[in-house]
Amino acid sequence: MVRCKTIIAHLSEYVDGEATPEMCHMIEKHLRGCHRCTAVYDSTRKMLVITGDERVFEIPSGYSARLHRFLDKAILEGSAS
Amino acid sequence: MNDQALMEKSREPFLIQRIRAGERSHFHELIRPYERRAFLIAYSVLRNQADAEDAVQQAMLKIFLHLEQLAEADKFAQWAMRVVENEAKMYKRKRHQHLYQSVDEEQEKEGQTKHFRPKQFADWRDLPNEILEQQEVRAAIIESLASLPEIYREIFVLRDMEHLNIAETAEVLGISVPMVKTRLHRARLMMREALSPIFAKPKVSIWERWKGVNPWFAAKR
């Protein structure tokens, strides 16, 4: 049986679909028999779904308007000087 | 990339050409698709919204002033986000609190996390889409992100929150692809670890479990 340490080390590649076919086979075989690694794998996937959602991070209101006002002013001043 | 994003991207070389020719107002349109990403990058370095906003403003001005230096117009996004990243780091160095936090300390943190191993093995509960409507859930995620050392935080933001691919992430950060992969892996494990206490299935005591399966107990209630 492959050690959990090896599986965890390749989990990120596996989640991204970048693991080699041999590695995928090894990981899947291991996950069928190891509850701890399955828990890490499942929770990593769940975590990536929620953290990848735009709603997680709210940009401060008015940020865009302030940015463009600042740029207008700075660029105008720059061209005047 | 969706259709709108593709269309915006294909217009970039044209907009850059117009701005270089003196039509400055096109700059607003050029940077609009990157405002959110720029803010997140600056925030991942500075961990403070007001500072992140200041750093983005300064970075965008630099992008405008140095647009001539951009050699390949189709690489605008990577180049511009690199400017934002550098500006945020410079801002951080200037900031008073970092008189106390040296570069050595960051490197030491990296050393400590080099052999990061998961310690939380509880199953997570199902997370419905609406869970992000809860302010406290969003706050917990941002807090967990803030707890990561900077080198992992910035990778996580670019790759897993802004969905850049590995090569783009490497270009923005100025590091190699294998380095992105290594750091991303650790960043994910750390984020998972930090969020596990919040999203793990509640532990059920033996008594509760027994109540759940004992027909006699259920009948007596």
Image (cartoon, rainbow, N blue to C red):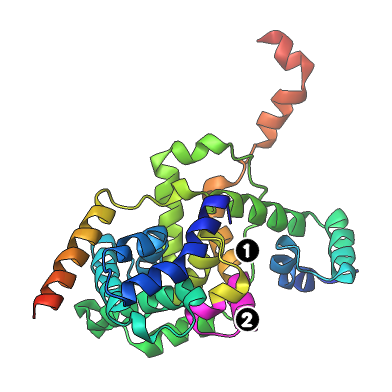
Dominant secondary structure, magenta: helix
Q: What element carries label 1?
A: loop
Q: Which mark is residue B119?
A: 1
Q: Quadrant of the C terminus of chain A?
A: bottom left
Magenta residues?
A: B170-185
Q: What element carries label 2?
A: helix
Instruction: Kindly identify the residue that appears in the image at 18 percent across and 64 percent down.
Output: A72
Mark 2 belongs to which amino acid? Answer: Val
User: Percent from the top left, x then y, of residue B159?
Assistant: 56, 66
Provide the residue designation for mark 2.
Answer: B177
Q: Is residue B116 visible?
A: no
Q: Quadrant of residue B18?
A: bottom left
User: Percent from the top left, x then y, of residue A10?
Assistant: 74, 71
Which of the chains bears the disc numbered 1? B
Mark 1 belongs to which amino acid? Answer: Lys
The reply, left or right, for residue B182 in relation to residue B90 is right
